[in-house]
Amino acid sequence: MVSREESARRTDRALASDNYAGAHPEVLAAVAEANTGHVGAYGADPVTAEAVSTVRGHFGDGVEVAFVVNGTGANMVGLQLLVRPWDCVICADTAHIAVDECGAPERFLGVKLVDVTTPDGRLTPDDVRRACSGRLDEHQVQPRVVSIAQATELGTVYTPEEVSAIAATTHDLGLYLHMDGARLANAAASLGVGLAEASTACGVDVLSLGGTKNGAVLAEAVVVALPGGAEYLRFARKQAMQLVSKMRFVSAQFQALLADGLWLRNAGHANAMAARLHDAVRDVPGLTVSRPRQANAVFARVPGDAVAPLQAVTPFYEWDSATHEVRWMCSWDTTEEDIDTFAAAVREIVPRHARGGRALSPG
């Protein structure tokens, strides 16, 4: 079995995470172009001003923007604007803030996460209502924020109508809606809509806008659409240790991604590679596609004995070791050759390990 540590030391191309991919050449070129002369620090520079204007071009002139360097930081800064110490954040039990942020919300924000079990990583309005049963009871934490991910950690995507329905319920209950948009670009590309149409235009109050998984190096942003909600944004960013002194190099990456559609080309390509892989392996005997393929990830269950041989071909994560569910994540630089080579290995290895090692014939 290939561990995360072993996989991280490998240098071949991987389907483990879109974080494994390097930076897009246009992003690196933008950083190099910004590396000229002296400019103001901490975002007081023309590159940052231009990038903020570009972000507003996508999300509206009324939004406030703060660039940060990682997704956990973006989530902490955004949520910090909305919560009080006795509050809770409602999220799916697979949410990044609940599973992969090492207790950062609990420690740094001092709030409880109420994680809701979902079949596909997506919350529903009914989920939100049920999670609000303890409102106004002084013995219980108070629901304050609903946090959803777009796309979700299970590769699924909320339609604009679904986001709008959650937003309506959330706001009717007097709560705020936060979106973890680390893969918002992939979700928007999958839906065929703009970034805002998959998020803030549907009622999202605070958005964590991802850049790193879309071809950047260290580039995330907090986009505040809530009127008056950004009053303390700059203080929250500083206290969360996300204020970069040489901000122009973060800002330049967003300018490169958002100014002329690079975000969409990158996300659309990653999604297309996932679709290519899904179509190539979905009928392989012994393999079951376990989640809808809606963005740039393919989830499948394979025989346990097939996991290590497949990881020897291409590094990836075993999502659930109990059920041998695996995740294959495509990136902006995944090639058709990468997919075809790995799909051929799946077609050769998985049937051999199915049903106790006896190969299965199709059908």
Image: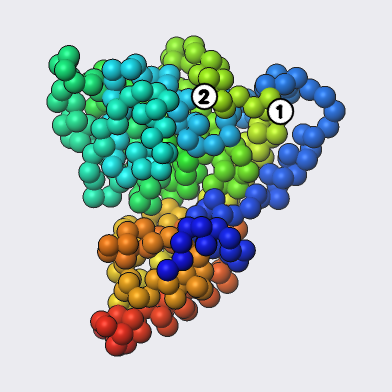
The residue beneath circle 1 is: 246
In the image, 161 versus 46, the foreground residue is 46
Asked if residue 300 shows in the view, the reply is yes
Rendered position, 340 above or below 267: below
The residue beneath circle 2 is: 240
Is 358 on the left or on the right of 39, as rendered?
left
- Which SS class for mark 1? loop
- Which SS class for mark 2? loop
Q: Local crowd at mark 1 within 10 Å, few (<14), some, or many (≥20)?
A: some
Is 23 on the left or on the right of 31, as rendered?
left
In the image, 272 versus 240, the foreground residue is 240
Kind of residue sitting beneath label 1 = Lys
| Rendered-image quadrant of the C terminus | bottom left
- The residue drawn where x is 35% and y is 51% is 154
Q: Nearer the viewer, mark 2 or mark 1?
A: 2
x and y, in percent, of residue 105 in the image: 39, 30
Kind of residue sitting beneath label 2 = Ala
Is 74 on the left or on the right of 247, as rendered?
left
Between discs 2 and 1, the one toward the N terminus: 2
x and y, in percent, of residue 188 in the image: 46, 44
Asked if residue 172 shows in the view, the reply is no
- The residue drawn where x is 58% and y is 60% is 9
Q: Quadrant of residue 79?
A: top left
x and y, in percent, of residue 324 in the image: 32, 65
